[in-house]
Image: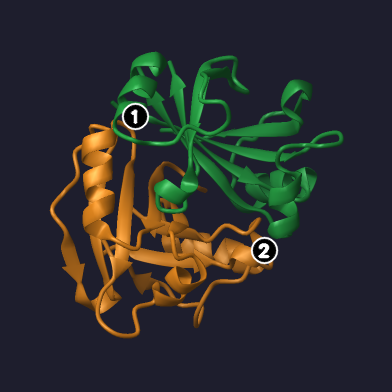
Chain colours: A green, B orange
Amino acid sequence: MIGRLNHIAIVVPDLGKATKQYEDLFGAVVSLPQNLDDHGVTVVFIELPNTKIELLTPLGINSPIEKFLERNPSGGIHHICYEVADISKAKSVLIEKGARIIGDGEVKIGAHGKPVIFLHPKEFNGTLIELEEL
Amino acid sequence: MIGRLNHIAIVVPDLGKATKQYEDLFGAVVSLPQNLDDHGVTVVFIELPNTKIELLTPLGINSPIEKFLERNPSGGIHHICYEVADISKAKSVLIEKGARIIGDGEVKIGAHGKPVIFLHPKEFNGTLIELEEL
């Protein structure tokens, strides 16, 4: 079912500083920041040869990553995203096998405009997993 | 400096259960477990089309991931690994720019038999980063 690793999402307390670090220390190419108002985050993308890293920081009030940053003031890896060919089919298989989908269990449109679901980290080795249809 | 994402390392409390989960729920191909006695871990590899996931669990006494598991009983993402072409050069650049190398600052031979260094998570957005020469 799972295909490529689409991205690793890392929450950072200071997006400017983190961008500069990836550029200056690691020699990586980092995109310009994008405000995703509907998702309450500002994001930059680091394109690696085989996948991408997303650096996220809270945007506006009630950002969904605000609490994560309170618990992890230095930042931290928030989730990893695997690609699937058919999100509805993936969801059915997972529910049938007893996995918990986060939220109301419905497929949502994620930050990249693609259909996504998130799986509960308690059941997946403390790892928040996003599945994204591509 | 950084190239491909080599792997994501996830510490798991029960390697058999985690293996079964990736196989049965995600349809992934998981390698047989390998005991890395010198590193105090048992590991399986999940080959994705573009990178790999390593599931680690403690092996023997004084495993370096024992404390991580105490703090994170469900498991969690332990580190991510970026490839570099020249680890000594990478190390020099990083030290020159003020980054902290974990341990005595020397290049070590990592779990894959390649030269590696680890960077301090406090300075890198709460993310433990391994650089591996390939």
| Amino acid at the residue labelled 1 | Leu
| Residue A54 location (% of width, % of height) | 60, 36
| Numbered disc in front, either 2 or 1 | 1
Residue to which mark 1 is pinned: A94
Quote the CA–CA distance across marks 2 and 1.
37 Å
Q: Is residue A3 visible?
A: no
Chain letter for mark 2: B
Q: Is residue B86 visible?
A: yes
Helix, strand or loop under label 1: helix
Residue B66 sits above or below residue A36 on the image: below
Q: Is residue B36 left or right of residue B110?
A: left
The residue nearer to you, when weighing B45 against B19, is B19
Helix, strand or loop under label 2: helix
| Amino acid at the residue labelled 2 | Glu
Quadrant location, the C terminus of chain A: top left
| Residue B20 location (% of width, % of height) | 21, 46
Which residue is located at x 28 percent, y 76 percent?
B40
